[in-house]
Image: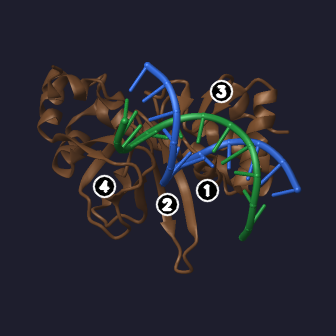
Chain colours: A brown, B blue, C green
DNA sequence: TCATTAAATTGTT
DNA sequence: AACAATTTAATGA
């Protein structure tokens, strides 16, 4: 049976922490499970935890007043999010929904604050983490203005496999074409055609509810 | 374990 | 958006 300290040590932000820091982090560390389709938090909630995906898949989204669903980002195993709301002590600005059955790790605000005030290693991680995330969002601007639909599908897929932001992703993803469409901002039909094209080019392997990535580098810079 | 059915997802128009 | 085809999951013999 893995101890809580072992679970903490397995997280990407903990590998350079001292034993004392890991011990401190363990005390504010907990786990929760969510069934597919359930809300992890709603916009406006006060959720004072920094949150990481241990297994499964989540999306960060909103529903407009007109009822339109808008997905900003997806996150798979090893991905941590929500530091913005924790740092500022603000309510969540977005909904977080489990796409698949998901196990989450949570670090409470007290512990998060303690680490950011006392651990150099933790701060190094945070800076790198925020920088990597920023890079991804800069990419989405190019994405919106320049890229064609199938390029968007390819790059949306690649986001799940950023080795720094989602270090625990295996080489495959369990997601429906509809969900991928919401994330890429294209119709389900476009996703379907695009995946077939990407498969023909040997970059992915698609099966029912599952996509295997064969050429991550190619997807990341895909432009048809 | 196998057959039947319902539900989810994909493929096409 | 609608429809057909396919795959998976659940149920019960």
Which residue is drawn at the image coordinates 28% and 32% (left, top)? A120
Q: Which type of secondary structure does the marked residue at label 2 adopt?
A: strand
| Label 4: how many Cα within 10 Å (few below 14, some 14–19, many 20+) | some
Lower position in the chain sequence, tag 1 or tag 4: 4
- Pick whichever, A96 or A85, lies toward us: A96
Nearer mark to the viewer, of 1 and 4? 1
Q: Chain of mark 1?
A: A
Lower position in the chain sequence, tag 3 or tag 4: 4
Residue corresponding to mark 3: A216
Q: Looking at the figure, which quarter contains the N terminus of chain A?
A: top left
- Pick whichever, A220 or A119, lies toward us: A220
Residue corresponding to mark 1: A182
Asked if one can make out residue A151 in the rendered structure from this viewpoint, the answer is: no
Lower position in the chain sequence, tag 1 or tag 3: 1
Q: Looking at the figure, which quarter contains the C terminus of chain A?
A: top right
Q: Which type of secondary structure does the marked residue at label 1 adopt?
A: helix
**Residues marked 2 and 1 touching at CB (< 8 Å):** yes
- Please state the total of marks drawn on the protein image: 4
* Residue A70 shown left or right of residue A60 in the figure: right
Q: Position of residue A133 (x, y in %)?
A: 51, 44
Disc marking residue A172? none
Task: Find the distance from the CA under tag 2 to the CA under tag 1.
Answer: 9 Å
Nearer mark to the viewer, of 2 and 1? 1
**Residues marked 2 and 4 touching at CB (< 8 Å):** no
């Amino acid at each position: 049976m893995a101890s809580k300290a072992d679970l903490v040590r397995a997280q990407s932000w903990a590998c350079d922490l001292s034993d004392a820091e890991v011990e401190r982090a363990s005390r504010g560390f907990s786990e929760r499970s969510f069934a597919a389709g359930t809300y992890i938090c709603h916009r406006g909630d006060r959720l004072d935890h920094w949150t990481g995906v241990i297994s499964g898949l989540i999306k960060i989204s909103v529903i407009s007043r007109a009822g339109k669903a808008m997905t900003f980002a997806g996150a798979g195993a090893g991905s941590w999010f929500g530091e913005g709301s924790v740092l500022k002590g603000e309510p969540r600005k977005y909904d977080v929904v489990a796409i698949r059955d998901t196990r989450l790790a949570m670090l409470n605000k007290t512990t998060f604050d303690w680490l950011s005030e006392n651990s150099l290693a933790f701060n190094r991680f945070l800076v790198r983490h925020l920088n990597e995330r920023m890079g991804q969002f800069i990419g989405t601007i190019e994405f919106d203005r320049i890229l064609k639909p199938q390029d968007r599908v390819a790059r949306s897929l690649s986001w799940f496999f950023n080795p720094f932001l989602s270090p625990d992703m295996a080489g495959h993803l369990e997601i429906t074409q509809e969900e991928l469409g919401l994330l890429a901002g294209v119709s389900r039909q476009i996703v379907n055609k695009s995946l077939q094209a990407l498969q023909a080019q040997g970059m992915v392997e698609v099966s029912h509810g599952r996509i295997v990535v064969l050429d991550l580098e190619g997807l990341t810079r895909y432009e048809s």
